[in-house]
Amino acid sequence: MTSPLLATAADTATGGRRRPLARRTAIAGLGVLVAFALVGPLVLADPAAQDLDRYLQGPTLLEPLGRDEYGRSVVARVAHATRLSLLLASACVATALLLGTAAGIASAWFGGWVDAVLRAVSEAFVALPALLVVLLVSALASGGSLWALYLGLALAQWVEYFRVVRARSALVMGSAAVEASRLLELGPGHIVRRHLLPDLRPVLVTLASLGMVTSILAMSTLGFVKVGLQPPRAELGLMITEAFPFYDVAPWLSIAPIAVLFVLTICFLTLRDSEETA
Amino acid sequence: MTDPNAADTLVVHRAVVRTPTTVLVDVRDITVRAGRPLTIVGESGSGKSVLAHALMGTLPPELAAEGSMSIGRSRFDLAERAGRRSLWGRQVALLPQEPALALDPTMRVRDQVAEGAPGWRPRETAALKRADDRLERLGLEGAGRAFPHTLSGGMAQRVAYAAATIGGADILLVDEPSKGLDRESLDRLAVMLAAHVERGGLLVTITHDLGLARRLGGDVVVMQDAAVVESGPAEEVLTRPVHPYAKRLLAAEPSKWSAPWTRDNLRADEAAEPLVTAHRVSKAYTGKPLFQDLSVEIRPRERWAVVGPSGVGKTTLGNALLRLTDIDAGWVRHSGTTRGGRIQKLYQDPGLAFPRRVPLESSVRDVMRRHRVDERHVRSLLDEMGLPFAILRRRPGQVSGGELQRIAIARAMLPRPVVLFADEATSRLDPVSQATTMDLLMRQVTGDGCALLLVTHDLDLAEAVGARQIRLGADEEASL
């Protein structure tokens, strides 16, 4: 039993979210970017269509972000790049999350040699820096392949889900609540659905928001150093590098992708923080 | 600020604590004098602990306090929290609930006791010496270098007491000190508190434990629903109470229980096949034997109690009989009738026995589906427990401990168990809730013809249930 004092304190802590405004702003910001990324490519011009007559044209009403060195529409390119980043990051996070959670639960549940093997594999991944894993996979595949990037990022990330889920599940599996469920013979489905998943959900949401940021940044980092996706594909990091030679005459070229990266990162991090305090 | 010698009375003129929606405490005119202890008893949730924190000025910021109190000749406004900080440790000290949690787990005992000494500075030997001295007087010589998690509940409490009083505070507020303590630790606690009073200190004790209230003597205040319902000298209030709630509180002591199930017991059939057979089981924990060569047979309808001081392995023995824990030697066999979830367990903290993030209804419905129980049966069972079905829409954390334990009993009865293991199931409840909960539990157990295995540190409780006892810890060997 908790004392009434603690109970009241706990009620107010869980009752109201501490920073509803920040959370709402983050959700709105993400919503706008996702809408832009999904709708933009459908209505805007072809991002690869060149128009060399309008080389580095400044922003106009029709082309709010101007045109790049090949006269391509920067708005259209940013929209495509944002869509690519969001989709690829979601795919990586979803894969890493499923793989990591399943492995983590299996490890805590069965223990013994299952746990030993999974732990050894995960530690091998931890020993390598995440970007190196991505680089390795990219290097093995043909240059600039989307699949290589996806596989590399997912492999680099599943370990953190695995480790967190394993530690947390081991605690839950040892709890009195699970012991009671075993005595009631409620079966493994009940334990996963009622005990493990509800307990893991908040952590997973936090990790996933952070994972989105990591994936998007890793992708653009690789694009920026030209080992990720290859031109002429529109990719945020790649766009930044390509715009560099022209930053004195056409600064809007590099500002647009940087702004998108910045807003995405801020929004996901805010979501993660409000999830932690909620 | 004040002359410390003047602090020989504590008067609470008026104290009101409220949340935006409810009043938690509303009391007036409570006086404590040096040498005459005051004990506040009452049910959980009646605002006793909140009152103590309001007097200390340590309420969480969501709770608003009003009113005033006087210490000696100086008067304090309860709404103004910061003003009393300078009194902490020097004039007023609080011995908190669950002392094991109040101690810093990363600091050695001696260092954290020394921190409260007047004029303490890091690595100052005078304060450390004082701490050693204090610990020694409390019978804790040698515990100074230990970390808090290695101490027993009773020892942790004495350490917390040393830390709280080393600053020389005359006024000591003690919040629920007897929770989870065995009889021996309880004796030491009573002696310790009485010594504080004899030295001329002021003592305010908040407790469920009427035995402790009786031993401390002085004045007693009975609280219910945020208000004082009865007060007066201990001898009077604790023998001839006037208010109906005070009467109920007194009748709730296990030694005074009388119910149909306290009489008709032990109609166990000696010839029946035992449900649980333990043969010469032994278990040691880090080299210390908990029990050795213990043999028990639990037959249908029998009542067994494992009793002994805290930390001697009562729960471990219970778990061993349920085959929830490994044993070092011997064997435990369950008969065929126990198959299909027909051995159930109740936990000391029911909050930990339910998945904490899902509504109770989902967990109970899973049990109903697995054991093919229809909703009408659950409704009538909850009805017998005095609970509405709608309470299941809440989560475990949103239900009081007493209610949750009753829901746990209802859940445990759903598979029609033949053995029920109650592990200190009522020890965290206040006396009135304990009496109701035990009554409901025993009615279910006798009604269903279920055998009961009770683990408790409360001998009176074991005797009230009329159980055969397994005593652990008293001597080297467990005795039957």
Image (cartoon, helix red, strand yellow):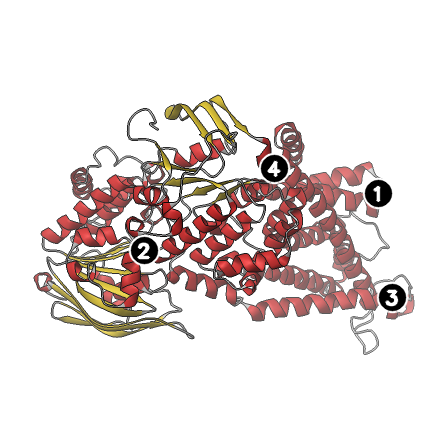
**Residue labelled with disc 2:** B252
- Seen in the picture, residue A162 relative to B63 is either above or below; the reply is above
Mark 2 → mark 3, Cα distance in angstroms: 88 Å
> In what element is the residue under mark 1?
loop
Amino acid residing under circle 4: Ala
**Residue labelled with disc 1:** A143
Instruction: Using residue B408 as the reference point, say whether residue A59 is left or right of it.
Output: right
Amino acid residing under circle 1: Gly
Residue A142 screen position, x and y as percent = 86, 40
**Residue labelled with disc 4:** A108
Mark 4 → mark 1, Cα distance in angstroms: 39 Å
Q: Quadrant of residue B11?
A: bottom left
Please state, as top left, top right, bottom left or bottom right, where the N terminus of chain A lies in the image.
bottom left
Residue B133 appearing in the image = yes
Mark 3 chain: A
| Crowd band around label 2 with a 10 angstrom C-alpha radius: few (<14), some (14–19), many (20+) | many
* Mark 1 vs mark 2: in front: 2
Please state, as top left, top right, bottom left or bottom right, where the C terminus of chain A lies in the image.
bottom right
Mark 1 chain: A
**Residue labelled with disc 3:** A71
Query: Would you say the residues marked 2 and 3 are in contact, meaning their CB atoms lie under 8 Å apart?
Result: no
Instruction: Using residue B450 as the reference point, say whether residue A227 is left or right of it.
Output: right
> In what element is the residue under mark 4?
helix
> In what element is the residue under mark 3?
loop
Q: Which numbered disc, 4 or 3, marks the residue that appears first in the sequence?
A: 3
